[in-house]
Amino acid sequence: MPLRIALSQLTTGPDPASNLAVLRQETQRAAEAGARLVVFPEAAMACFGTRLGPIAEPLDGPWATEVRQIAKDAGLVVVAGMFTPAPDGRVTNTLLATGPGVETSYDKIHLYDAFGFAESKTVAPGSEVVTFDLDGARIGLATCYDVRFPELFRAHADAGAVLSVLPASWGAGPGKREQWELLTRARALDATVWLAAVGQADPAASGVTAAGSAPTGIGHSALIGPDGTVRERLDAGPGLLVGDVDTEEVTAVRRTVSVLANRRLGVNP
């Protein structure tokens, strides 16, 4: 049976409690649509442009605890971006994955020190590749700027993943939508995995004025097949994308496009 997933494209604000209310509502919508997994954007806890240090909480803190309750109440797995304290006084940009039979987290490895923004000033990098299993499918976790580094997605595939989820809060600017669409399709194809890329909605499409240069989202979330074709896509505004992931298609594509088996560089002997 295909794995039904939901991508919740929304605009979060600076208040973690208010954002939790939206997550609860959207998780219920995903459950009613039959999804087994709902993926929220990076910075679902609080939007970029917010002072992250004062709002960061550990994984056993109240915000993450409430996300666990939301997942439990809906009976599905939730992936949501939050911020946790780092030992050096910065925070980590963390994905929490929680729900029936699933409890793990991923700290963003590649920090967005690009296009005039320096994420590393306030955020410490992670170092571990993280996957989890749901209904017999292995799923890899990545965040936003990670999409520019194909080796992470190949590491997901090497770990047995058939789906990578990519929460993001993509920065706006000339050519940035085109880069988002190109990179997400390329990562699906060069790792031959399904890719669920879910970004923050464009604040303007949500009636919100974005302040400063922080990356606050452009929308255009997508579900992309292991052959690099876009199966479903949202526009700039808020929305819930529900789609089915056929894990057997990964096997078929890898027989035809054997890029993983044919690698000669970066492969462990």
Image (tube, rainbow, N blue to C red):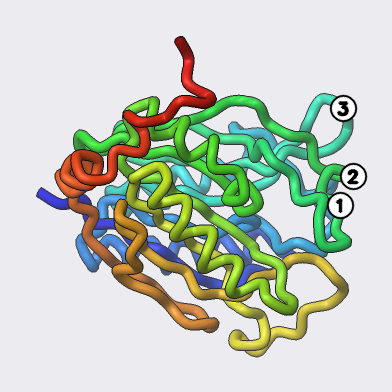
- The front one of 217 and 98 is 217
Would residue 122 appear left or right of 152 to someone viewing this image? Answer: right
Residue drawn at the location 21% of the way across and 45% of the way down: 256
The disc at residue 118 is: 1
Tell me, yes or no, whether the two marked residues, 2 and 1, touch with CB atoms within 8 Å.
yes
The disc at residue 52 is: none
Foreground tag (3 vs 1): 1
The disc at residue 121 is: 2
Q: Position of residue 173 (x, y in %)?
A: 74, 76
Q: Amino acid at mark 2?
A: Lys
Looking at the picture, does residue 83 appear above or below residue 87? Answer: below
User: Splitting the image into 4 quarters, where does residue 232 fall?
Assistant: bottom left
Circle 3 is placed at which residue position?
88
Q: Of label 3 and label 1, which has the lower sequence position?
A: 3
Q: Position of residue 178 (x, y in %)?
A: 58, 73
Residue drawn at the location 40% of the way across and 42% of the way down: 191
Secondary structure state at the residue bearing disc 1: strand
Q: Amino acid at mark 3?
A: Asp
Q: Amino acid at mark 1?
A: Ala
User: How would you rate the neighbour count of disc 3 (Cα within 10 Å): few for under 14, some for 14-19, many for 20 or more?
Assistant: few
